[in-house]
Amino acid sequence: MRLRSDGPVKAGSLRDGLPSAPQAEELVDILLESPGLRLERIVSTGQTTNEGEWYDQAWDEFVVLVAGAARLQLEGETEDRALEAGDWMLLPAHSRHRVTWTQSDPPTVWLAIHYEEQLSRREAEGQSAG
């Protein structure tokens, strides 16, 4: 898939605006949004998924831990998966998962790419997206 922008070049740092203390909620910045695709920076300062709740998304998600550390629980697995800076995970649509721990100081920074199932299937089959 080729992303295009008719606007000016944009640049930034995933480290800009990080909180100096734990926050009540995660910070979510949408860096790019296009039909079938959303790129987010997520900053966690100790947040977790509520006990008994699961993410069950209708789209695929590729996540990279940029800074900090976290643990994710995947449905059906007995042990949490530990993530450190540089680790990534591809979560296919409807992969039930939950965040069981995030490092608060310094903050945990995620880069999440959400994309539609149809797009990932087309890419996997080697078909042109445009």
Image (tube, rainbow, N blue to C red):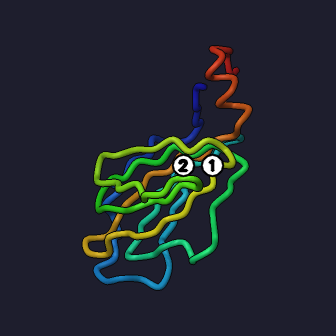
x, y percentage for residue 84?
29, 54
x, y percentage for residue 38?
60, 48
Q: Is residue 62 above or below residue 99?
A: above
Q: Residue at x 73, y 49 (%)?
A: 58
Q: Residue at x 39, y 76 (%)?
A: 46
Q: Residue at x 60, y 25 (%)?
A: 1
Provide the residue designation for mark 2: 39
Extreme residue toward the left, this view = 106
Q: Residue at x 57, y 46 (%)?
A: 61
x, y percentage for residue 60?
63, 43
Residue 120: image quadrant is top right
Image mark for residue 95: 1
Q: What SS does tag 2 mark?
A: strand
Q: Is residue 48 above or below residue 87?
A: below
Nearer to me, 69 or 32 = 69
Disc with the residue nearer the chain's start (1 vs 2): 2
Q: CA distance from mark 1 to mark 2?
A: 19 Å
Q: Is residue 20 left or right of residue 50?
A: left
Q: What SS does tag 1 mark?
A: loop
Residue 3: image quadrant is top right
The residue type indicated by label 1 comes to Ser
Extreme residue toward the front, this view = 78
x, y percentage for residue 111?
44, 52
Q: Is residue 23 left or right of residue 74?
A: left
Which quadrant of the rendered structure holds the C terminus?
top right
The residue type indicated by label 2 comes to Leu
